[in-house]
Amino acid sequence: MSNVYHTYMCWKCGKETKINGFVSRSDVCPNCGADIRSCKNCVFYEPGAHYDCHETIDELVTDKERSNFCDYFKLNSIGDSKKNSNKSENSKDAFNKLFGD
């Protein structure tokens, strides 16, 4: 069985870090001590969305910077961030082709 490493960028200090396997509620950034399993490190976190989340959560998580029990949590890894960035850029390009000058 091989170890699965995730590379992510901490929402607080901005440093790129690797974590092995499952992200537990007690995991913290080794650089700044911020909770890793928090809304701000989740792939579904989107300020302005319903409860600031793209998932259909039933209950508001009030402190987005602290660990929580959300079943939808998925670490926003560097690979996911790049995919989301590319998706956003592709959407902008498509919009500009349709409505641009």
Image (spheres, helix red, strand yellow):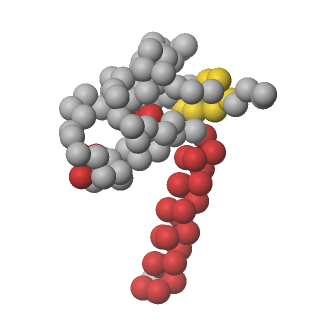
Q: For this rendering, which residue is in front, 18 or 37?
A: 37
Relative to 22, 92 lies left or right: left
Residue 79, placed above or below residue 96: above
Residue 18 shows in this picture: no
x and y percentages locating residue 62 in the rendered image: 21, 32
In the picture, which quadrant includes the N terminus? top right
Q: For this rendering, which residue is in front, 76 or 14?
A: 76
Tell me the quarter of the picture where residue 8 sits.
top right
x and y percentages locating residue 42 in the rendered image: 44, 38
Identity of the residue furthest to the front in this view: 1
x and y percentages locating residue 5 in the rendered image: 68, 29
| Residue at image point 43% right, 38% down | 73
Relative to 88, 49 lies left or right: left
Tell me the quarter of the picture where residue 90 sits.
bottom right
Identity of the residue furthest to the right in this view: 1
x and y percentages locating residue 71 in the rendered image: 39, 37
Residue 59 shows in this picture: yes
| Residue at image point 47% right, 79% down | 96
Residue 19, placed above or below residue 75: above
Q: For this rendering, which residue is in front, 12 or 68?
A: 68
Residue 41, placed above or below residue 98: above
Relative to 100, 56 lies left or right: left
| Residue at image point 49% right, 39% down | 74
| Residue at image point 47% right, 86% down | 98
